Amino acid sequence: MSVTSFDHVLSPTSLGALTLRNRVVMVPMGTEMGDRDGHLTEREIAYYAERAKGGAGLVVTGINAVTNDFEMINEGLGRVDSDAATPGLTALAAAVHAVGGAISVQLTAGLGRNINVVDPDNPPISASDNGHYADPSVTCRPLERAEIKVIVQRFKEAAARCAEAGIDAIDIHGHTGYLIDQFLSPVWNRRKDEYGGSVENRCRFAVDIIRAVKVGAPGLPVTFRLSVDHRFEGGRTPAESIEIALQLEDAGLDMLMIDEGSYEAMDYVFPPYYLGDNCMLGSVQSFKNALSIPVLGCGNLTAERAEQAIAAGEMDFAGIGRALIADPEWANKLADGRRDDIRPCIRCNQLCVGNAFVGRPLGCAVNAAVGFERERVIEPADVEKHVVVVGGGPAGLEAARVAAVRGHRVDLYEREERLGGVLWPAATPEFKKELRSMIFWWERQLAGLPVTVHLGTEIEASSPALADADAIIVAAGSTPLVPPIPGLDGENVIEVVDAHLGAELGERLVVCGGGLSGADFALEKAQEGHDVTIVEMTDAVAADLLLINRITLLRDLAEAGVTVLTGHRVTTVDAEGVVVDGPDGESRVDADTVISAFGVRPATGLAAALESRGTVIAVGDCVKPAKVGDAINAGFEAAFAL
């Protein structure tokens, strides 16, 4: 898609009575940076302010509970259910306004059947007697009419606190199958009173909330985030969601945020790289046509598609989420004509969603400053050093970049003829193209810094290149694990990295090893038309992959026709394929090409040989093979400390 300017994305606009400098909206995402009581901390405020400073027209916080009257609030979850929240809200508004931004607070009625922690003495609440999402043996208690009215009142009170604190807008959390969504959806709402049955009745709870917020915070625009397609059998479809949206508009809503998914289709809530670019824009145009209020589109949204959609009148606002975690200057870089300098989000969900799911503060695989916006400001070092970085993979590239930004003179040595390390072969599938974008991004950054890149150069402990180094960062990566299996050295056997890089493959493939590397390779080749079988010794493919991503991977493998043999061990490889031992004994899997994807082990040799020297820091897979985000963060931290 050829887009040379982003005039429509960056054009000033209004949201209700609020003037915004552009149409870039940082959509709500939880941070887990609040204190134990769910109140804003300086760390969290700095995180939001950095995105406002980077040019986003409107920054929206993660969810904040308005009440704990009927549902336990998980420790650390944001909350504005008392005046104790007001000082933090005031500080947040001041910090965002100081950098020319606008701030919205997302309010939630609660999680209902999606609540994380079930109190055995206090059943979860819901619209009806639904089973708990994670434990269907737990039955939710339908809210009583009087309790519904209490929650509506709490929204009014919470909105008033936000207005008093100087917050600019209010967003209502109505998606993902949480409590409000449970009222909106017939799959969860089987009530016989005025809150159930017809679309109008099922919308009554949400409509009353919008009106209450308008009363509590007069003049503040109110937005609503709605899952227009639940993406599971029996869930809501876009056609019904338009009827709901019209009810919300009539209640006084100022803008509708359109997204998709539910806990039953979790991958659409946090779309991984498998879902590709712009994966939620399919129905946005229909909502734009049906409503008179603005609509926002999101979902792995690229800058180019956002510009095209706004210019064509498909939508009014660009909802940018994880891309603003990866690069808070997303909007400013577009405005400055620096599109290629935007650090790509690789949509791995590793340290953003992954951290949040286990209660750890938000991080980022490609941006180690997330959550440390004040502490990890890269500033010139007191003394210039000569830094040698060995290895041009993700850890080495990030270490070289950060060391050079600090003002050090950097020599980067890579034994291959290209940069990227394992990222280069890993990025061959279309669904992982953002990994390759990261390599191009690093190359562009290094080109403008005091970094000399030496390709095709093997470094050993005795190499003269290390002689005058003040610090050596070893990012030597890993080596393939080759188990002692007869025939694994045969001519029809190709290591998975080489297979990614254009080796000649037969029609029938057996991938020996169902880790992420093997599984992604299998998916790529099956989508190209190969007949692929994965043989995995354990009982699960890609077992260490984040569940949200794994849901999509397993579905895509099945749709692509990949045969998956878990609980099977490869015992022999021959010219006709492999022999495996499984639950039913020994069997054969015929194949033209056998792919060795048994994993990797750290390349520790160089770091061990250099341990007697001065400042030597080993980072990345040569310490312990891990995910790309761990390598990038380790490279950052090593160079930042010099």
Image: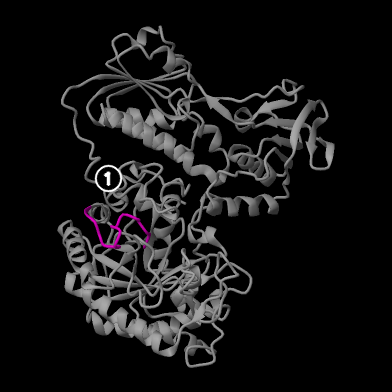
Task: Please determine whether, in this image, residue 617 is positioned above or below residue 592.
Answer: above
Residue 361, horizontal then vertical, whole percent? 35, 51
- State how the image is colored: one colour
Residue 340, horizontal then vertical, whole percent? 36, 42
The answer to whether residue 24 is seen in the rendering is yes
Task: Please determine whether, in this image, residue 239 is positioned above or below residue 630.
Answer: below
User: Is most of the magenta stretch helix, strand or loop?
Assistant: loop
Instruction: Indicate the amino acid at tag 1.
Output: Phe
Left or right of residue 127: residue 336: left
Q: Residue at x 55, y 33 (%)?
A: 425
Left or right of residue 535: residue 549: left
CA neighbours of label 1 inside 10 A, class few (<14), some (14 to 19), many (20+):
some
- Classify mark 1: helix, strand or loop: loop
Q: Mark 1 points at which residue?
A: 372
- Quadrant placement of the C terminus: top left
**Closer-to-camera residue (478/253):** 478
**Closer-to-camera residue (434/32):** 32
Is residue 127 rendered magenta in the image? Answer: no
State the extent of the magenta-drawn residues as a range.
28-42
Q: Which residue is drawn at 60% across and 31% down?
A: 599
Q: Residue 379 is drawn in which quadrant?
A: top left
Q: Which residue is drawn at 65% across and 24% down?
A: 482
